[in-house]
Amino acid sequence: MRERIWAPLLLLLPLLLPPPLWGGPPDSPRRELELEPGPLQPFDLLYASGAAAYYSGDYRQAVRDLEAALRSHRRLREIRTRCARHCAARHPLAPLGEGPGAELPLFRSLLGRARCYRSCETQRLGGPASRHRVSEDVRSDFQRRVPYNYLQRAYIKLNQLEKAMEAAHTFFVANPEHMEMQQNIENYRATAGVEALQLVDREAKPHLESYSAGVKHYEADDFELAIRHFEQALREYFVEDIECRTLCEGPQRFEEYEYLGYKTGLYEAIAVGEYVKALECAKAYLLCHPDDEDVLDNVDYYESLLDDSIDPASIEAREDLTMFVKRHKLESELIKSAAEGLGFSYTEPNYWIRYGGRQDENRVPSGVNVEGAEVHGLSMGKKLSPKIDRDLREGGPLLYENITFVYNSEQLNGTQRVLLDNVLSEEQCRELHSVATGIMLVGDGYRGKTSPHTPNEKFEGATVLKALKSGYEGRVPLKSARLFYDISEKARRIVESYFMLNSTLYFSYTHMVCRTALSGQQDRRNDLSHPIHADNCLLDPEANECWKEPPAYTFRDYSALLYMNDDFEGGEFIFTEMDAKTVTASIKPKCGRMISFSSGGENPHGVKAVTKGKRCAVALWFTLDPLYRELERIQADEVIAILDQEQQGKHELNINPKDEL
C-alpha cells in the first residue's frame, strides 16, 4: 500500500527537483524583454488577431499583433521560469524522515512550492494563469515559428524588406524543408544585396550562437577561441536545459546540432596538444556511447601520449556531463519505480539518437575541412541509413471503390512498394491537367531554375496552397483547385491504410509537377529526367549505402506519385538497387496510376528521360512525425475550412421563393 501512495509522488519528483547549479551559472545574462503596461495579453489571442488581420489585408495591424504575440510568448516563458526557480529556492524539499508520517514534511514543502508558484505567476502575469492556456495547435505553430511566416509576408506587403528577410530566415531555420521560403530568402538577398552570413535568426538560442562562432574560429585555425566558444556553448546549453526542466516540459530537442556529442570537441583539444582535456572529453562521450569503437581507440591513443607522471586512471570524464548523465539515470529509476507502483510498464526511450540531437555523427563541426581530419586515428565514418524500426506490413484496405491493385512489394522486387490504378478518373485527370496549365511556375521548388535536373527538360511545379489561392482569385476554377487538395488527401489515406500504419501519416510536402521535353535537345540523350536518389537519405552508390544525414529530408517516411497523363514519350519511373544502375522495376505512368513506397535507402528510384511531350504528376511525401507537417498544407486546411463555412452560410441564406409570398 505504501508503494502505491509513493508512486505518483515519485513520478512528479523529477519535475520538482530544484535546478542544479552544475553545467553553468543559473543566472547567466539573458536579454531582458521590454515590459508592457497592464496584464500580459494571451499570445494565442494576439496570434489569432494577427492572422485574421493578415487575411483581411490589414498588414500593419497584422504586424502589430503578430509581433505582440511573439513578445507575449517569450515573456510568458520567462515569467514561468523565474517563478519556478524563485519558489524552488524559497521552498526546498524537506528531507525524508523515518517512522509514521515521515513523508508529511516533504508533502508540505511540495504544497508550499506549488502555492508560491501560483501566487508568483498570477502576480507577474497580472491575472489568472488560466488565461494563458493554449491549444496544442497553437503550441505547435509557435514551436515551428509559423508566426514568422505570416510576418515575412506582411512586411513584404509593407515594403520593409530587411524585416521581411529576418522573419523569413527565422522561419526557415526551423523549417529547412520549406522550399518556397528558401526561394523567398534568395529573392530577398538578391534584391537587398545581403550575404548569407548576415541573415538574422530572431529566435537563435545563445548556445547555438556560441557554437556557430566556435565553428568559424575553428575553420580559421584559431583553436584557442574555438575552444572558448565551444565551452561557452556547453554551459549555455545546460542553462537552457535547466530552464526547460523548470518548465516541466521534458528535455529540449535541438534538431541537427550535435555539439553535445563531445566528439567534435576532441579536435579542438588535440589542435593545441591538450591531451588530458581530450581524454576527459572522450571519456565523457563514452558515458552516452560506451560501445563506440572509434572513441575507445582514441582513449587508448590519448593515454599513450600522456606524461609518465600522469596516471590515466586518474583522469575522469568531464564533470558537467557526468552530472548530467547521473541525473538522467536517477530520473529514469524514479519513473520506473512510479510506473511499477501504478501498475503499468515503462520502457525508457533511447535519448542518445540523432532525432533528439544527441547522436554521434562521427564528424567534425559542420563546414570544417574534412581532408585533414583523419588524424591520430580519428574515424570520419558516416552514419548509415538506419533499418526501418517499425513493423513492415502491407496489404491493408484501399478504402475507395474502383481502385485496382496492380503489384505489391514482392512483384515489384523490393520492400514496402505498391502500384495501384484508377486512383483518379479520366475526367479528374483532365481537370487537374487544366489546373496545372493555369498555376504552374517554372522551377517552382528549385529556386526558379528552369532545368534543375537535366538541361534537356523544363520543370514546372505548384503547391496545394498556390492552387487554392489561384482558385480564390479566379485564375482557375475553384472547384478544380480544390480537386488537387482532395485527391492528395485521398492518396494519403490510401498509403496510410495499405501499409497498415499504427500512427497518423502527415503531409511533409505536396507538389504538382510537370516535366516537358525541350525540342531540339532530344537526340542521343543518355541522361535521366530525375537522377537516381532516395527520399530521406543521401544515396552513395559506390559504397552501396545511404547516409541518413542533412541535407537529406531525414524525416520523410513514405512517398507517392499520382500520375495525370500518358501522352508523352519516355518518363518511366524506375526502382534500382543501391548501385543506382541495376533496375529492379520500371513503371509506365498513365492517368490515375499511383506508385507508393517507403522513403528510405531500401527504395532508390528515378525517372527516365522525357523525350517528347509533357509528363505531369502529383508528388507526395509523408512523415510520421507531426513536427514536420507541411506548413502550407496546414494553411490549405484553414482555407478549405473557411470555404466550407462560406458555402454552408450560402446554403443557410438560400431563401425559398415560396417563403416570400
Image (spheres, rainbow, N blue to C red):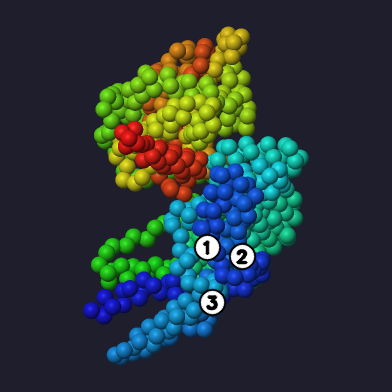
> Which part of the image, by quadrant, shows the N terminus?
bottom left
Q: Residue 203 at what x, y percent from top left?
A: 61, 56
For label 2, the residue is 236
Residue that appears at 59% across and 14% down: 518
The answer to whether residue 2 is left or right of residue 295 is: left
Relative to 378, residue 285 above or below: below
Mark 2: give few (<14), some (14-19) or many (20+) Cα within 10 Å.
Answer: many
Q: How many marks?
A: 3
Cα–Cα gap, marks 1 and 2: 28 Å
Q: Which mark identifies residue 424?
A: none
Residue sitting nearer the eye, 391 or 303? 391
Q: Residue 437 at what x, y percent from top left?
A: 52, 21
Q: Nearer the viewer, mark 3 or mark 2?
A: 3
> Which part of the image, by quadrant, shows the C terminus?
top left
Mark 1: give few (<14), some (14-19) or many (20+) Cα within 10 Å.
Answer: many
For label 3, the residue is 123
Q: Would you say the residues marked 1 and 2 are in contact, meaning their CB atoms lie under 8 Å apart?
A: no
Earlier-in-chain disc, 1 versus 3: 1
Residue that appears at 74% across and 43% down: 195
For label 1, the residue is 42
Q: Callout 1, which amino acid?
A: Pro
Relative to 175, residue 13 above or below: below
In this orientation, does residue 442 appear?
yes
Q: Would you say the residues marked 1 and 3 are in contact, meaning their CB atoms lie under 8 Å apart?
A: no
Furthest toward the left, the residue is 1
Q: Residue 248 at what x, y percent from top left?
A: 46, 67
The answer to whether residue 166 is left or right of residue 421 is: right
Earlier-in-chain disc, 1 versus 2: 1
Q: Would you say the residues marked 3 and 2 are in contact, meaning their CB atoms lie under 8 Å apart?
A: no
